[in-house]
Amino acid sequence: MPGPVLLSDIGNVLTFFDFSVAAHRVSERCPFPPEALSERLDDIKGPFENGDMDDDTFVRAAIQALQFEGTPADFAAIWCDIFTENEAMKCTLAPLVGKVPMKLLSNTSGLHKDYLLRTYDIFRPFSGGVYSYSAKCSKPAEEIFQVTIRELALDPAQTFYIDDLETNIATAQRLGFQTHLYHHASHANLEAELNAWAAQHGLTAGHPPVDVRISMP
């Protein structure tokens, strides 16, 4: 029978991200200003995250759309170098490492997922996950949550799900997940709810309050 599981979104939960960092770096090597780059990629970002376009195809299409003067490897490196680890979250999860399975559920591309998992220590306790690019569907649609329940063998009633978007949380709640709508400025609320959930399931999560005065990228 499925037991308790911690399920987490990635962006603005485990890591922060700032696409403007990539936009400014790309704009130094293309004829367009940083603020114009997102719109020029609108037609391909959605298909890329939903798995309708592989990494190499996306990179080539982005280079063409932006008239980027550099190699595919140059662009991929810039595209990925937009994240910073959420240190407060890493501290909060530490007491649960090895005591409860930790899984991921994220709207992301393979390019970003692979970069994140090989780069940041916060992902080391996580074993497996469901991602929009491979599931061919994305949050907040119910479909990706159903895929997650099935592929990760979850019991929603025993799963603590963390996400930073209300629409995603609403879907999870309809399906019976225990949820937390996360914001870094209210990190102490997450810690309190997670500790209560851990105690409910006989896990040890006691941990001094985390200093949440963290700097955003």
Image (cartoon, helix red, strand yellow):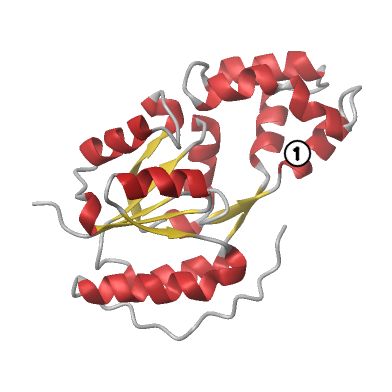
Above or below: residue 180 compared with residue 202: above
Which residue is painted at 52% across and 54% down in the image?
120
Above or below: residue 109 compared with residue 118: above
Which residue is painted at 48% across and 73% down in the image?
189
User: Residue 107: x and y, percent?
Assistant: 49, 37
Report the number of discs: 1
Q: Amino acid at mark 1?
A: Ala
Above or below: residue 58 compared with residue 18: above
Label 1: which residue? 22
User: Residue 96: x and y, percent?
Assistant: 32, 70
Q: Is residue 200 left or right of residue 54?
A: left
Q: Nearer the viewer, residue 109 or 68?
A: 109
Does residue 118 appear anywhere in the picture? no
Q: Nearer the viewer, residue 157 or 203?
A: 157
- The quarter of the rendered structure image containing the C terminus is bottom right
User: Residue 71: x and y, percent?
Assistant: 73, 22
Answer few, some or many: residues within 10 Å of disc 1's Cα (few below 14, many 20 plus, some between 14 and 19). Answer: some
Q: Is residue 7 left or right of residue 42?
A: left
Q: Secondary structure at mark 1?
A: helix
Which residue is painted at 66% across and 76% down in the image?
213
Q: Residue furthest left?
A: 1
Above or below: residue 153 compared with residue 91: above
Q: Residue furthest bottom?
A: 208
Q: Is residue 132 left or right of residue 26?
A: left
* Quadrant assignment, res 88: bottom right
Which residue is painted at 54% across and 19% down in the image?
47
Q: Nearer the viewer, residue 76 or 2?
A: 2
Q: Is residue 88 left or right of residue 23?
A: left
Does residue 198 appear anywhere in the picture? yes
